[in-house]
């Protein structure tokens, strides 16, 4: 176990700046998720921590040691890749023991460590198989097993579940979280799926265009997004963000619809409310229904408030026809306001 | 049951396939029959009896043991060298951060369309003027360089633009993540090349190997201009012993031709197992 401290990490490919002075502190044993849209630099950041990419500026510190110039093998990290990257010419056993053999670990010890990792991941009966003889989920487990046997100080995951189908993804999500609880090793996990980040990580780093937008616990980010981008990125479906301006009556949209808010900050130009925070209220804002999506557990209604896109999720079974209008409202405490720059006006 | 409508085109295709197959098989049958024709009988007809002694007579008529040794040495060493150079160069062009890779690839592709005969004269001059070799001074003058030597015979077969190009394409198709995973696992760059990537391009190695061996084994023109003594001759040059001023000993010639074509055939059969399409399956999604 080790902490990871990134100080003002910069990375550019020619004139293109991919990482712009990123600073993050990962505590020992913490599970940190790096999230952000495609091209935000999250995978590049992970690769710089692994030593697979050089950094143009900054300091990477793992376990109190500056590792900027160390090779990947000397950083005491293990990485699980998006597409497994198993060696196809080697059996599961050989894949998992490869790093230990390179280190010159005695054979008996190699077998012991591989068997232990295989037991954790339920791979005991697959050790003699080749990657081509495994299913997607099994391959992903082998990739994790390969990382576990090294007993590294830090695990790095680069979108490890993105190639799996939805059902397997949920299962593997739980397995990785359980693995973290069991091993207690520091983990840094890259994903573009914010649900994955919310459910697995103890801390989330939201990235956009090579800069950190916000760092915090999953619920902290959910409840108190620092800006419009984080507000829209965290949560699924994403937060409703309506344009307008503050008037003496309240926040008013360009269509003249007044939205309830406790905060009367005159700089507010965007009104945010999460779909799941809405309730049906006869005096609430008018939501013109376009699509109704009942799942049994909840009902999702997609439509418009004035001319602006709006989504609501309700635990009740709502019988609303497309084209009809329902009235919705939310508690004032869960309303978010943002200024022209997109910063929160909490 | 298939309709007669679909059977007719299939029969036609079988006919075409048979004709094409005959184009390859008939000459082979001709060679076999000619090699077994007793001396004095005209070749090209069914012999009155099968004269297997032709094979002994043919190989006894000249120093074929030495020619065979020369051919084997030249072919095996140049094939091994070409595989090694094609793999290393192809890997470097595909996977290493090499400046000017695009330009090098363009030159390689340009080389593919140059007939070997065009470069034969410059190659001969270069071989003759290798400094400090074969009695040459530092400017490459005064001696015979690589002429009439085994390294000289191997020279044009040691490296091939086609081999490098082919290997580069295969290495290029392999995912970079395999190398990254090995780097994290603690493998050196040399190990990544030898243990991770190269085992995955064995089909391409087999193709380059068979091309290289065949081209060195069957080469006639280069040994002809590079050798002066009989000691350095290869099997292909040795065949000329059967061509005399007024006649040609076709039966003996064919016996040797058939025999010396067997190693290439054997090599092809041996390396067939490397032509596996599924070698990469399971590595990545």
Image: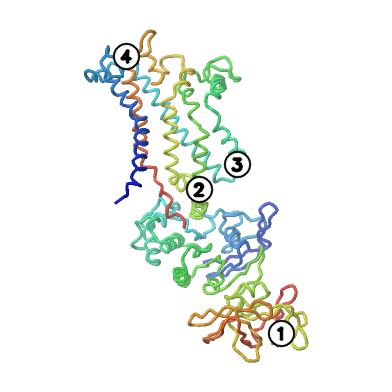
Q: CA distance from mark 3 to mark 2?
A: 16 Å
Q: CA distance from mark 4 to mark 1?
A: 108 Å
Residue beneath label 1, please? A257
Marks 3/4 same chain? yes
Residue A78 shows in the view: no
Q: CA distance from mark 4 to mark 2?
A: 51 Å
Residue B61: which numbered mark, if any? Answer: 4
Q: CA distance from mark 3 to mark 4?
A: 52 Å
Sequence-wise, the earlier of marks 3 and 4 is 4
Q: CA distance from mark 1 to mark 3?
A: 62 Å
> Is B62 rendered above or below residue A199?
above
Q: Quadrant of residue A321?
A: bottom right
Residue B247: which numbered mark, if any? Answer: none
**Residue B104, percent from left and from top:** 60, 38
What residue occupies the far top of the structure in this picture? Answer: B246
Marks 3/2 same chain? yes
> For the residues carrying marks 4 and 1, which lies nearer the camera in this image?
1
Helix, strand or loop at disc 3? Answer: helix
**Residue A45, percent from left and from top:** 60, 61
Mark 3–mark 4 CB contact (< 8 Å) = no
Marks 2/1 same chain? no
Mark 3–mark 2 CB contact (< 8 Å) = no
Mark 4–mark 2 CB contact (< 8 Å) = no
Residue B173: which numbered mark, if any? Answer: 2
Quadrant in which the C terminus of chain A is drawn: bottom right
Sequence-wise, the earlier of marks 3 and 2 is 3
- The answer for which chain carries disc 1 is A
Residue B101: which numbered mark, if any? Answer: 3
Q: Is residue B29 left or right of residue A168?
A: left
Helix, strand or loop at disc 2? Answer: helix
> Is B5 rendered above or below residue A204?
above
């Amino acid at each position: 176990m080790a902490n990871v401290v990134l100080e003002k990490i910069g990375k550019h490919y020619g004139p293109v700046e991919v990482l712009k002075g990123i600073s993050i502190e990962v505590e020992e044993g913490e599970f940190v998720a790096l999230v952000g849209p495609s091209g935000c630099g999250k995978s590049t950041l992970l690769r710089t921590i692994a030593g697979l990419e050089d950094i143009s500026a900054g300091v990477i510190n793992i376990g109190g040691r500056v590792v900027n110039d160390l090779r990947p093998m000397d950083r005491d990290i293990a990485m699980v890749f998006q597409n497994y990257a198993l060696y196809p010419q080697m059996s599961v056993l050989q894949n998992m023991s490869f790093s230990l053999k390179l280190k010159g670990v005695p054979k008996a010890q190699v077998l012991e460590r591989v068997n232990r990792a295989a037991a954790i991941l339920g791979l005991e009966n697959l050790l003699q198989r080749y990657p081509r003889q495994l299913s997607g989920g099994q391959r992903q487990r082998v990739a994790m097993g390969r990382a576990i046997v090294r007993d590294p100080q830090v695990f790095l995951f680069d979108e490890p579940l993105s190639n799996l189908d939805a059902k397997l993804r949920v299962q593997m999500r739980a397995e990785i979280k359980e693995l973290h609880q069991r091993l207690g090793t520091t983990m840094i996990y890259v994903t573009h799926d914010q649900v994955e980040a919310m459910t697995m990580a103890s801390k989330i780093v939201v990235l956009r265009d090579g800069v950190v937008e916000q760092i915090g616990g999953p619920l902290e980010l959910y409840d108190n997004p620092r800006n419009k981008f984080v507000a829209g990125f965290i949560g699924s479906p994403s937060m409703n963000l309506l344009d307008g301006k503050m008037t003496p009556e309240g926040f008013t949209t360009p269509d003249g619809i007044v939205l309830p808010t406790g905060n009367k900050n005159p700089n507010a130009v965007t009104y945010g409310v999460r779909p799941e925070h809405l309730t049906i209220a006869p005096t609430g804002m008018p939501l013109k229904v376009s699509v109704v999506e009942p799942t049994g557990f909840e009902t999702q209604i997609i439509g418009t408030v004035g001319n602006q896109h709006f989504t609501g999720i309700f635990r009740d079974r709502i019988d609303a026809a497309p084209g009809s209008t329902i009235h919705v409202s939310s508690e004032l405490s869960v309303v978010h306001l943002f200024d022209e720059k997109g910063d929160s006006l909490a | 049951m298939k309709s007669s409508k679909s059977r007719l085109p299939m029969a036609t295709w079988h006919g075409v396939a048979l004709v094409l197959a005959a184009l390859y098989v008939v000459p082979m049958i001709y060679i076999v029959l000619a090699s077994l024709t007793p001396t004095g009988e005209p070749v090209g007809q069914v012999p009155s009896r099968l004269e297997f002694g032709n094979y002994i007579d043919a190989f006894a008529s000249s120093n074929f043991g030495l020619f065979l040794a020369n051919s084997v040495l030249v072919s095996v060493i140049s094939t091994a060298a070409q595989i090694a150079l094609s793999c290393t160069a192809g890997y470097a062009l595909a996977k290493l951060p090499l400046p000017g890779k695009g330009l090098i690839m363009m030159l390689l592709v340009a080389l593919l369309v140059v007939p070997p005969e065009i470069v034969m004269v410059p190659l001969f001059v270069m071989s003759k003027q290798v400094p400090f070799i074969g009695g040459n001074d530092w400017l490459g003058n005064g001696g015979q360089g690589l002429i009439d030597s085994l390294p000289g015979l191997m020279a044009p077969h040691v490296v091939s633009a086609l081999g490098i190009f082919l290997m580069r394409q295969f290495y290029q198709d392999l995912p970079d993540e395999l190398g990254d995973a090995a780097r994290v696992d603690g493998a050196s760059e040399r190990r990544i090349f030898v243990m991770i990537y190269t085992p995955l391009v064995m089909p391409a190695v087999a193709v380059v190997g068979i091309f290289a061996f065949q081209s060195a084994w069957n080469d006639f023109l280069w040994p002809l201009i590079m050798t002066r003594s009989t000691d350095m001759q290869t099997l292909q040059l040795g065949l000329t012993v059967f061509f005399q001023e007024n006649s040609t000993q076709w039966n003996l010639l064919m016996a040797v031709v058939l025999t010396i074509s067997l190693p290439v055939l054997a090599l092809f059969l041996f390396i067939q197992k490397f032509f596996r399409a599924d070698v990469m399956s399971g590595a990545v999604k």
